[in-house]
Amino acid sequence: MNGIIVIDKPAGASSAEVVRLVKARVKPARVGHLGTLDPFATGVLPILVGEATKLAPFLHEGEKHYSGLIALGAETDTLDPTGAVVRTAPVPPLDPAAIAEVAARFHGAIEQTPPVYSAIKRAGVPLYKLARRGEEVAPPPPRTVSIERFELAIAAPDRLRFDLVCSPGTYVRALARDLGAALGTVAYLAELRRTQSGQFTLAMADSLADALAALERGDASGLIGMRAALAGMPEARADAETERRLRNGDSRALDCIAPPGARKFKVVAGERLVAIAEATSRVTAVIERVFAAD
């Protein structure tokens, strides 16, 4: 089985746990995921199965869409509802015009300091593991992320609903923290739901229970094929001899077949994804990945 299953992850399950549950039903295939969702969060979690695990570097691009709730007046050590409250502050009166003005400050390219409780590694160890051991962890260095849309609505005197479109690598927990500071208080991310990850949307997603039940029945109808997963990537077709040469790692088989103007492109034979390649000139290219035949 090779392809992508889009799961609407429930709250309480880690992304790694979802991978383990899928893997137990598709052995011996390899299984991975795109874009970790924290256990408290819900929503779109693409699961890569079999040869599709090789697609991860090519599918990480693309905007992330989220909705959720920010709690004002308290900050937790994890910046989410699973942590312990480490500080509190009064919440100023919330005015829609002022809220919109503050939200606008977070539009475009911004610098963001990731949370200490994150998967960023130091000396090979994720920071969240160091923090949970009780070790003192210095904040990671700031990074630049891009916010395409950040819309806020007042849900309660100390709660803000939001809709967010952002670049991969954006920490929504850090955004909640920084929004609180901009409003003159403190905050944490109370709820988070990912509604889209790149091309994968909630409309494509099955519940975890339904996806696992289908796998147990051997039903692959919810599986997105590898070629379809790369629908936005330019495509070149290979005949039988070109396919044979590519599967043997011969990049010269790509000469003159790259789609005009394409830098990165996929090579297919029939409906099968054979390889992903990168053009090095108008007539030559190199193989980046080769995929085993089904």
Image: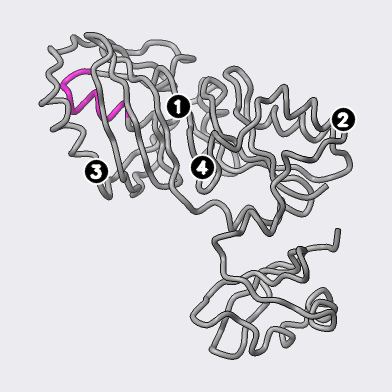
Lower position in the chain sequence, tag 4 or tag 2: 4
Say few, some or many: other residues with alpha carbon within 10 Å of mark 2 (under 14 / 14 to 19 / 20 or more).
few
Q: Name the residue under label 1.
A: 136
Q: Which residue is drawn at 61% across and 34% down?
A: 205
What span is colored magenta in the figure? 176-185
Q: Residue 182 occupies which quadrant of the picture?
A: top left
Total numbered labels: 4
Please state which of residues 248 and 202 is positioned toward the viewer in this rendering: 202
Q: What x and y, as percent, mark residue 161?
A: 31, 21
Residue type indicated by callout 3: His
**C-alpha separation, residue under disc 2 versus residue under disc 3:** 46 Å
Of 51 and 229, the residue lying toward us: 229
Left or right position of 178 against 80: left
Which structural element holds mark 2?
Answer: helix
| 66 on left or right of 48 | left
User: Which is more foreground, mark 1 or mark 2?
Assistant: 2
Q: Mark 3 points at which residue?
A: 107
Question: Residue at left 52%, top 75%?
Answer: 263
Q: Which residue was labeled with disc 4?
A: 197
Q: Which of marks 1 and 3 is nearer the N terminus?
A: 3
Name which residue type carries label 1.
Answer: Glu
- Mark 4 element type: strand
In this rendering, which labeled residue sits more in front, label 2 or label 3? 2
Element type where label 1 sits in the image: loop
Residue 217 is tagged as 2
Marks 3 and 4 sit apart, C-alpha to C-alpha, by 19 Å
Q: Earlier in the sequence, mark 2 or mark 3?
A: 3
**Of the pair 138 and 28, the residue shown nearer to us:** 28
